[in-house]
Amino acid sequence: MTTPGEVERTLRAELRGEVDFGAAARALVTMDASNYRRVPLGVVTPRDADDVAAALRVCADAGVPVVPRGGGTSIAGQATGVGVVLDLTRHMNALLSVDPAARTAVVQPGLVLDRLRDAVRPYGLTFGPDPSTHSRCTLGGMIGNNACGAHSVAWGTTADNVTALAVTTYAGAAHRIAAGWDGAPAGLRELVGAHLGLLRTGMPPAFSRRISGYGGLDALLPERGVRLAQAFCGSEGTLGVVTEAVVRLVELPPAPALAVLGYVDESAAADAAAGLLPYGPLTVEGMAEDLLGAAAGGAAAGAGGAAGEAGRAVGLPRGRAWLFVEMPDEGGARAVARGADALDTLVVTDAARQRALWRIREDAAGTATRTPDGRMAWPGWEDCAVPPARLGAYLRDFRALLAAHGLRGTPYGHFGEGCVHVRIDFDLASASGVARFRAFSEELADLVVAHGGSLSGEHGDGQARAELLPKMYGPDMIRLFGAYKDVWDPAGGMNPGTLVRPARLDENLRFEVLPATPFAREVARCVGVAKCRTTEAGGPGVMCPSYRATGEEQHSTRGRARLLHEMLAGEIVTGGWRSPEVAEALDLCLGCKGCLSDCPVGVDMASYKSEFLHHHWAGRIRPLAHYTLGGLPGWLRLIARLRAAGAVNAAARHLPVPLPGLARERALPHLAKRPFTRGPGEGLPGRASGAGPGAGPEPGPQGAGGPGPGAGPVVTLWPDTFTEYLAPEVGRAALLVLRAAGLDVTVPRGGGRICCGLTYLSTGRLDRARKVLRRTLDTLGEVPGAVTVLEPSCAAALRTDLPALLPDDPRAARLAAAVRTVAETLEEYAPTWRPPRLDRPLVGQTHCHQHAVLGDAADRRLRERAGLVGEPAGGCCGLAGNFGFEPGHHEVSVACAEEQLLPSLRAAPPGALVQADGFSCRTQIAQLGGVRARHLVELLAEGLTDRGTQEASRAAPDTRS
């Protein structure tokens, strides 16, 4: 019998692409976006079709199964396997040619859909099928699942848009198939000829979303043109590997318009959908109010005058359910709005507003991963479809079935084609929960078939539904499916256990290998939809900067979550918390927290990294950076106490080598000679009574920052480590701005003993972080008013990490609830204050923690009132606290900055102001961009000073003779 080691060695000898049978490579592909987990022998990344053929020959000779894999976003388990996984995304990802006149393109299987769409858009063309994972799903995966997406109403499924395929089978034989019998494997024509009657009468009623099983097998009928390529689509990697495809392109409407129709409830919307098809829509999408969840600010209040509060909160018309009907032009959209029997309608022609509304629907893939009460919901019955005329009745029965099993889910989907997406709060970790999952699955399959539907409407059956296909097709057709596979794959090596002779739907569940711990439950949140694998730059999103810099799966949020999953399982990754594989993957995690906001399920990899590092280095000498950078507050406090800032600055300028544990490419930031809370005269300027920009300090009875007479609302200005020791000018500017707004500002005493614990968190020194936070709470006592925090990373740590680390201390929750940014403080406590008009263009960087945890809506409004035009860059600056100063990170740090930040600085208009509220962002801008960035309060303070000077000049008497 051939051993895995022998297979690996033979593959290495035969292939030019990479062969990796290591623990990390295997762990990264044990799962897709489904509930299932299978452990492979190894991973092969072929460079071309010859490599694919060689890999298939080697595996066939050794009797090792093969699973082709694209983006790994399949939700039914078909992209997992126990043999060799072929990763087709790394090398075989090219757009080979485009023929605009013929409206075709030749693509490799690893090409991401959005790359194809971007390339053909200048010709006014697109690829019609557009699943919600369009930014990371691949054409090969779409062919394997016969993917559809929102616009299949107009442009059909992937099978409808594939004209020819190059396919390599398990033994390495090459086939080129299109229409007709040319290229067919031996015996296929005879098999079809012997079963013409069954193919004509034994299939379920045909409708556009009959995707389950080999549902396109009747495309081989002579009256349908013997469309071999179309029949191959939807085979889920069970017949062979697609190495090249010729796809059909469609014309993009130049000015599509969107009609949004509001209905009393979901049933009314579903019943109405089929009646809109005669208008010729490009898409008819549906969702109900429960999908909006917290984004809408609560549930709607009924269908009358107060109806649709949830919808109106996000810009939808009145109603408790909505249809999004896209038409080729405005006239068509208005005709739909007039003709629809809807409660309320909205026609949108502006492209930006259309995108904003579509984002609500597209984000449903993430919203639906949680029930309205916050429980996790899982795939498994993600895309059943029924004929559109049956959709309303089916949804009513479906909701009743959910209730009968005590389950909850939030349906939405392609109502124009009767396809419903839903994730359900199954308990897949206990025996009783798994039993309920099976019972529900069997009953739901019966329900779908009773309505004339398909168990899968676009995502494939995989392991989730293949066992139930006999309910839909009957025994004779199931036997024909088996024979069809055997003609293509007589040895049964292609993705066994999928579609034909399938595994049970309740085995290989990914949750069963995890321990029953809170951390394991957190790691299991990652459902694998791979939004973190998006490579497009631009926009406010942050996740996942390290993946976009390296392109390696292990540096994506999903990849790291998978490695942690396998670490906890202990089957492949066997080192536990000391695992070198996990440590390597997490090393390039910037701790940006972008995944907390941008991941559909809110994976918080920065917190997972802290937990891992806490255990990984327990009882051991840590890396020097954990002591130098991780202990930064303590070192800065000591330097200040010794009054040694000048000496340290001089030494940093003249040292021939970097400090131990720091990157040699980085210059150390300049230390302030005096900390913020030790201003001139060793005393912080106190409160000023309603002071404006020209008011002098007025120390109060509480010492530094004590109250003055006749003061306005009280707020507390947090002396974070960065402001205290590195950028006291930001603190002084904040005092000026807050007092100008009429606020009564207090700055706590503490001399550096007040700290959010951020640097200890980022290096995984959790016990030290807890100690520091308890000391902080003891030092602070009760704080008055809002706690205004200038450094976004410190504000984020106080708002989220503090209560998580000290859950039993009520003071932690109170302080977290009081945290505000400067803009939030001004908006809440000084709503009538008018900031100075700066009237300048603006560039810079939005801090990643502000994006992920705090939000920047108040900042945007404040900038607008100050006349600042433009937006700071999205993404991550790449310095990310200690990350960019640690050895081995400089290249990735620079790559992150080059994605959005540095190009925006180079393209800045003349006279633009550069804003960056985070100290790390300002440091990165200075070191890589060569310009000085300032905190928003510095810009406002400068405007206040200018305004005060101008007002004083206007008020001065004229002394001219």
Image: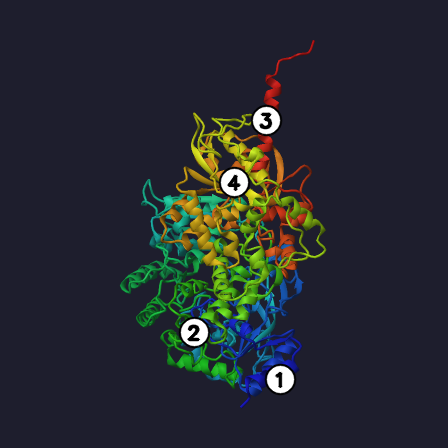
Whichever of labels 2 and 3 marks the residue nearer the N terminus, that label is: 2
Mark 4, other Cα within 10 Å: few <14 / some 14–19 / many ≥20? some
Q: Residue at x 57, y 67 (%)?
A: 584
Q: Distance between the residues labelled 2 and 4?
A: 48 Å
* Label ID, residue 463: 2
Q: Which of marks 2 and 3 is in front?
A: 3
Look at mark 3 in the image and give the residue it sits on: 947
Look at mark 1 in the image and give the residue it sits on: 10
Q: Which of marks 2 and 4 is in front?
A: 4
Amino acid marked by disc 3? Arg
Asked if disc 3 and disc 4 are in contact, CB closer than 8 Å, the reply is no
Amino acid marked by disc 2? Gln
Mark 1, other Cα within 10 Å: few <14 / some 14–19 / many ≥20? some
Q: Nearer the viewer, mark 1 or mark 3?
A: 3
Whether residue 736 sits left or right of residue 202 in the image: it is right
Whichever of labels 3 and 4 marks the residue nearer the N terminus, that label is: 4
Local secondary structure at mark 2 = helix
Q: Where is residue 508 in the image (x, y as percent from the top left)?
A: 42, 75
Local secondary structure at mark 4 = helix
